[in-house]
Amino acid sequence: GEDVEQSLFLSVREGDSSVINCTYTDSSSTYLYWYKQEPGAGLQLLTYIFSNMDMKQDQRLTVLLNKKDKHLSLRIADTQTGDSAIYFCAEINYGQNFVFGPGTRLSVLP
Amino acid sequence: GAGVSQSPSNKVTEKGKDVELRCDPISGHTALYWYRQSLGQGLEFLIYFQGNSAPDKSGLPSDRFSAERTGGSVSTLTIQRTQQEDSAVYLCASSFGTYTDTQYFGPGTRLTVL
């Protein structure tokens, strides 16, 4: 089946940029997403990108998509302690099945 | 207004029993999603309802799982003959339209199969 992979852990210093990477196998992905899950809270959709786009920027968040390499990244500028959470990469294909990655736990150190 | 609600919040059952999980989406949301999150694993998409269209069931992990959505609103996820590997948090979400709209997640039902 289709697969989405992420590194499981990332630690950064407060104020630095964080880059969370994701790779996927489905060449028919139409949308790719980044979700944030904070401790004890539900999932929050951060941003999404359509598969024919290379980049999308939204305030501190920058999403880069390399469709040839099937690589998606999320860059968080000026990372704050409130950004500590698990970040899930997900994709949806024409069959309308979401596939999620295992999540990257971001720890922001003071 | 009220968010997505799910019931029960916790369910402990014995292996082999059937369970039914309920999701009440936000009023007016046409799309409804079921996911599960197992300990140590990521989120797994199960099924997606859009309006009154028949859902794609290919994401359901086995034929013991079924889901329905009555009247385009409340949804139930039924697991027959539960197995220990079914233990997980089952999350429901709804969105106003399609999968580019923000999904609002419920608190989840924690299912434990003994």
Image (tube, coloured by chain):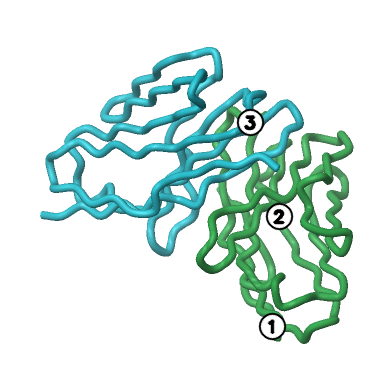
Chain colours: A cyan, B green
Say which amino acid is labelled 2.
Asp
Say which amino acid is labelled 3.
Asp
Location of residue B110 by image quarter: bottom right
* Count of residue discs: 3
Q: Is residue A12 left or right of residue B12?
A: left
Res A26 label = 3
Circles 2 and 3: CB distance less than 8 Å? no
Which residue is located at x 49 percent, y 50 percent?
A: A43
Chain letter of the residue beneath label 3 in the structure image: A
Say which amino acid is labelled 1.
Val
The tag earlier along the polypeptide, 1 or 2, is: 1
Circles 3 and 1: CB distance less than 8 Å? no
Respond whether the residues carrying marks 1 and 2 are from the same subunit. Answer: yes
Question: Which residue is nearer to you in this view: B102 or B65?
Answer: B65
Rounded to the nearest angstrom, the CA distance separating label 3 from label 1 is 36 Å
- Residue A80 percent location from the top left of the image: 19, 45
The residue that disc 2 covers is B24
Rounded to the nearest angstrom, the CA distance separating label 2 from label 3 is 32 Å
- Residue A1 percent location from the top left of the image: 70, 43
Circles 1 and 2: CB distance less than 8 Å? no
Tell me the SS state at disc 2: strand
Question: Which residue is nearer to you in this view: A8 or B59?
Answer: A8
Q: Residues within 10 Å of mark 1 (few under 14, many from 20)?
A: few
- Residue B3 percent location from the top left of the image: 58, 51
Tell me the SS state at disc 3: loop
Chain letter of the residue beneath label 1 in the structure image: B
The residue that disc 1 covers is B12
Q: Is residue B13 left or right of residue A80?
A: right
Tell me the SS state at disc 1: strand
